Amino acid sequence: MTTVIKNGTIVTHDLTYEADILVEGNRIAEIGPGLGGDEEIDATGCYVMPGGIDPHTHLEMPFMGTYSADDFESGTRAALAGGTTMVVDFALPSPGQGLLDALKMWDNKSTRAHCDYSFHMAVTWWGEQVFEEMEAVVRDRGINSFKHFMAYKGALMVQDDEMYASFKRLSELGGIALVHAENGDVVADLSAQLLAEGNTGPEGHAYSRPPQVEGEATNRAIMIADMAGVPLYVVHVSCEESHEAIRRARQQGKRVWGEPLIQHLTLDESEYFNQDWDHAARRVMSPPFRNRQHQASLWAGLQAGSLSVVATDHCAFTTEQKRTGVGDFTKIPNGTGGLEDRLPMLWTHGVATGRLTPNEFVAVTSTNIAKILNCYPRKGAVLVGADADLVVFDPEAEKTISAGTQQSAIDYNVFEGQRVKGLPRHVLSRGKLAYSDGAIRAEEGHGTFVPRPPKGSVNQALSSWKALTAPRPVERSGIPASGV
Ligand code: DUC
Ligand code: ZN
Ligand code: ZN
Ligand code: ZN
């Protein structure tokens, strides 16, 4: 069985051109004019792009005394309806639990996925077992990315010595380090202070996590990654302080990437203040939404290339779950949804406003992360031989975002009422029509795990610290030669 996508304009991260795409089985078989196939999808007036990749989801995640409400079933339905054909979720070992054991749990959770997926491994504690099992996770399971929480003290947080040890191990294994960069000690202290002063409402969450806690942790992670010689990916960059650290590191030649979320790009801190409790609590996530200056910094970073990927951190909780935190904002489960809305929101606020070109849109929603996580060009590409994960995207189609029509299992949407222009019309997942004109077509279990081998070559330390500790040439005058 072959399918041909006809009459569309192909948009990749670097090219825009008119051609048909012939799909055979899971793969793209041919790209060119006048192709025919057993079935035809008409893409007249549409762009044909690589399927979105969301590298940051928490589906059915055990967290803050509950589980996030979207599992791999509803979460991947939301993904497909929004033009995303691959998600990367986080396998989280509980304290003392082995990495391979935790991965088995995530294997079981993911059996009902409607679209392809991969995992990052989280390092939530440190010991000999973790050190040993990291090798099997990389070599045998094809997982090259390991996340470290610098916040959530007493739960997921790792200390600097643990993070440094893990980063060094990753450097040996050719892996990549991910960080949730917030200073968890400061957050814990500020939270206790706010509660003691009677600030118990959801706005306290925002006050307890100012941009400084993120900027400090981002700088620290960059320096530790540099000393360990490991590439670093900073998740959910929400503010100028963190962006500035990433910009500077990149200018110095360090392999550091930053990931803003669609929520931080389009929603601001006014969502927390002078709002009713439910409205504000539904938007409690870490880091919190920021002011407009920070938003402008994130958009500038996407435009200039100092920020590389737009994700969601999709971690959805129902209103009832959020209400666990009435009377104590530290008990409000942290997280918001966005899987179904990421592409339409970014198109509307990014491309339609002229901030991003369609090619840049493809880069930050798909291709860049496929390269960073080492699954390109199987994913993130419109090339012969690549997986046929494709979106037929109608730039003129419009809708109003509403919880009433979403795939997500929760009872609200943080973008409720937003008018978006630019929607997926048809979505193919490994050659199968997975979403079409409003309906999910891919069956449960269609999704498969995408292995991502270590990268090696990108993983050479470019550290100025290493250069400084190496023997240095000395000029005749006795003054050390400059130039590191
Ligand atoms: N932030 C959230 O808001 N939820 C899940 C984990 C995280 O880091
Ligand atoms: Zn996080
Ligand atoms: Zn997250
Ligand atoms: Zn289903």
Image (cartoon, helix red, strand yellow):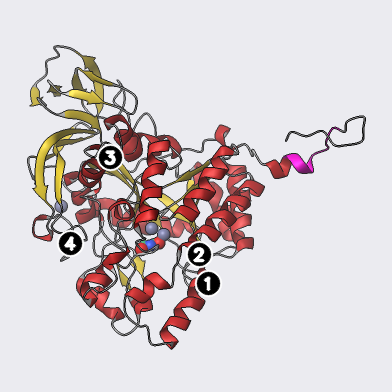
- Marks 1 and 2, Cα distance to the nearest angstrom? 7 Å
Residue with the mark numbered 3: 52
Three-letter residue code for mark 3: Gly
Query: Which residue is found at the position 41% from the left and 40% from the top?
Result: 308
Q: Left or right: 428 with respect to 365?
A: left
Magenta residue check for 359: no
Of the numbered discs 2 and 4, the one sitting upstream in the chain is: 2
Residue range corresponding to the magenta coloring: 467-473
Q: Left or right: 191 with respect to 457?
A: left
Of the numbered discs 1 and 2, the one sitting upstream in the chain is: 1
Instruction: Residue 391 in the image: state x and y as whole percent.
Output: 20, 34
In this view of the protein, which residue sits in the foreground, 302 or 380? 302
Which quadrant would residue 468 be assigned to in this image?
Answer: top right
Of the numbered discs 2 and 3, the one sitting upstream in the chain is: 3
Residue with the mark numbered 1: 186
List the single residue furthest toward the front. Answer: 293
Q: Secondary structure at mark 2?
A: helix
Three-letter residue code for mark 1: Val
Callout 2 environment at 10 Å: few (<14), some (14 to 19), or many (20+)?
A: many
State which quarter of the image contains the N terminus: top left
Q: Secondary structure at mark 3?
A: strand
Res 440 seen here: no
Residue with the mark numbered 2: 213
Of the numbered discs 3 and 1, the one sitting upstream in the chain is: 3
Three-letter residue code for mark 2: Val
- Marks 4 and 3, Cα distance to the nearest angstrom? 21 Å
Mark 2 or 3: the one toward you: 2
Instruction: Using the image, determine if residue 446 lies above or below residue 149.
Output: above
Query: Which residue is found at the position 8% from the left and 44% from the top?
Result: 438
